[in-house]
Image (tube, coloured by chain):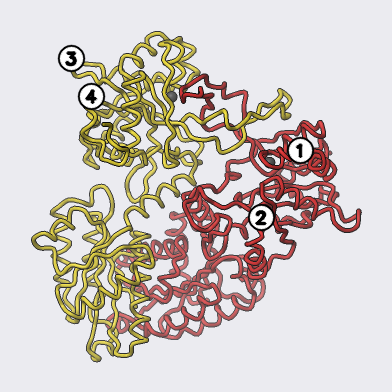
Chain colours: A red, B yellow
Amino acid sequence: ARKSDHQPAGCSVNFPVSVVLPAGGTGERTGLLTPKQFCSFLGRPLISYTVQAFERVPWIQRIVVVVAKENVDLMTDIIQRFQHRKVRVVPGGSTRHRSICNGVLALGEGEEEERPKVVIIHDAVRPFVEEDFLYKIAMAAKEQGAAGAIRPLVSTVIATTQEGYLDHSLERAKYRASEMPQGFTYDVIYQAYQRCSESDFEFGTECLHLALQYCGTNAKLLQGPPTLWKVTYKRDLAAAESIIKETLSGTACVITGGSAQAVTLADALQKAVGALDTELDVIPDLLGENARYLLKESNFIQVSVNGSSLSEVETLLRDLEAVNQAVLHPLVVIWMHLSTSDELSVSGRAVEPAAIMDLASAAKLQNILLYGIQLHQSKDAELWERSVLKVAEITSALIRERSPALVGQLLQA
Amino acid sequence: ARKSDHQPAGCSVNFPVSVVLPAGGTGERTGLLTPKQFCSFLGRPLISYTVQAFERVPWIQRIVVVVAKENVDLMTDIIQRFQHRKVRVVPGGSTRHRSICNGVLALGEGEEEERPKVVIIHDAVRPFVEEDFLYKIAMAAKEQGAAGAIRPLVSTVIATTQEGYLDHSLERAKYRASEMPQGFTYDVIYQAYQRCSESDFEFGTECLHLALQYCGTNAKLLQGPPTLWKVTYKRDLAAAESIIKETLSGTACVITGGSAQAVTLADALQKAVGALDTELDVIPDLLGENARYLLKESNFIQVSVNGSSLSEVETLLRDLEAVNQAVLHPLVVIWMHLSTSDELSVSGRAVEPAAIMDLASAAKLQNILLYGIQLHQSKDAELWERSVLKVAEITSALIRERSPALVGQLLQA
Ligand SMILES: [Mg+2]
Ligand SMILES: [Mg+2]
């Protein structure tokens, strides 16, 4: 029996699949000087997010990124900096088809048994492609020779007269937008590029069209999710950043140190932050089983009760640096200082602001964003509730915004 | 001679123009429960931004917003809350065409001389339409009977076989995406709806098509800017928010109080923040001519040297509340406290954090976001430069992010 779409696809792909990512675009349409695939958010260029989307799929073997000659060094640096492992950089040609063709030829070099059975072609500026859809494309490509993602048309398509007037509008239901990824057997895409004309290389953009015209292969079309959209304009970079930020802020881990007061705060926070869309896991420490949080969590809240020592948060920072999880995205660490004695509440702060600022400056170099929040445990239930709500709002904002400018601040709840 | 595109278009439109905004959509595609036209960013629903885009055009007379019956009250509240003046709410029909038709009929009620010559139809979820493009559409509609915005296709359009295979791809250059706004003479759009069939009302969406089919009017097609894009998915809301935030953070006004030390800080800040894309105007106070900043500026930085009084910022808040500029978007006020004596640097803070927090809580109710930044004027040039850079980064982040959760915080530079 065929596996259902929702099962992990990993083990079902028993043939070699590799990827060509044309990334030669100049990004005119973003209104930015940097080509959009090299524009960064959260400290990382878009192309690295796209590479990561493929790299994490176990059955994808190699990824060829095709960039303009002048960007080969830049791309090589990106691969090193973000520790990508499956990637090879290939210089592009003067058009999109020439670049994709270079990528396909690069996959064909070497021994015949190293050649992929299926080649997936994708845009460098569509970072949110997911494994289940790649699986569908790969399977359909193997079966049909070619497969491509489609989406419903979002606007009516119209034909214009030469003078710029409406000629007629197309019936929307009969047409689709052709998107990426597309998949081909190596033989089909290789033959298509062998047989196509100079004019195809120069003016064409649609690989599915070449497969049809030169190999007689009618591609299987699969409706993709809206997340396949292409980062085209500057606003799309903001949209992509917000998606990444939302993904990173879904959960956080509260470390209580085991103190009863910290647990009470964590429980109250859990409810309040839950209403703001971040789920909290409350744990006493990161020992034993709980060490797994160091590998999977992007947001940590270290609760300290009284005392003015930053030693717990220093330990946490050391642990996080040791597991090297901040390479791909900034981690957030919030030091939450709960004071319970009246004495501390009078002085207003228990910790010298300079100490946390220094610690934060050092952590920032490791891509860890450290913030502090200070609150006082009032005996007045209403005041306490208000404080917890405030802490929750601040926590949620820090985790969502991941603002590098505000690291080291000791905020008041 | 014809006016150039870049002159203000206001005085050239000497015929009545009104607007129909169909806003009946259910917003399924955003993945949100609220229809997208009612989703808020910076505290204001999308539909209000779109209404504002038309309301600020002096030659546009009336705006009819067509909403589903169950949203009439909600829309009426929005109009009151954001003090819209040209708007009438009309209940929609069961399809897009029926809703637009209701809007057109509403504009035709009353005396014949009140009827618009040209009706502009636009989507509630395209908030960034600009006056110069509306001018072009209105003029072309008056001349040709109908006019519509087009955009180049972003994807290849393909025809599919019934079995879901590629049939053929369209030659991209011959086709365009039909977008909004569209303009019609009242007579053309009225006749088109009088003559069209039940099937058109039920299944059609394209007004240009009705004008062609029922009035023989070939619409003039005008290429619109990319900012006309339609807020369709949740990510588009993030993109729209980022555009609004960028617009709001382009400039800020620094009020020095005239002190030499404050002016030195403001000048240093001007350079540093300039590198971060916010332009600063430095003024001693808001008296006389400078009172105009209260009406046009969205970001204020009040510098205080030594002393721990918040009285200057209290005055500023009162002035801002008096001019009522925070109705449409949140204003940012940053109280920047510069301490110069060594004594103050030892205690760490000159102001009781609770005082600024209380002030900020009250200001927030007026849609004014108050933050504090404290810095010490070091005699060491290197330390001072570092402080200024830090202040600039924090200032820029506060102005850009406009985070309600962080109001009342006294940040350290
Ligand atoms: Mg293609
Ligand atoms: Mg229409």
Query: Label 3 marks which chain's residue?
Result: B
Q: Quadrant of ligand 1?
A: top right
Tag 2 and tag 1 share a subunit? yes
State the mark number for residue B98: none
Q: Which residue is mark 4?
A: B16
Compute the Cα span from label 4 to label 2.
Answer: 53 Å
Compute the Cα span from label 3 to label 2.
Answer: 62 Å
Tag 3 and tag 2 share a subunit? no
> Is residue A352 placed above or below A97 in the rendered structure?
below
Query: Label 4 marks which chain's residue?
Result: B
Query: Can residue B262 be seen from the camera position used here?
Result: yes
Which amino acid, mark 3? Glu
> Is residue A11 placed above or below A315 in the rendered structure?
above
**Residue at left 23%, top 38%?**
B84
Helix, strand or loop for disc 3: loop
**Residue at left 37%, top 45%?**
B40
Drawn side of residue B237 relative to residue A87, left or right: left
Which amino acid, mark 2? Ala
Q: Which residue is mark 1?
A: A197
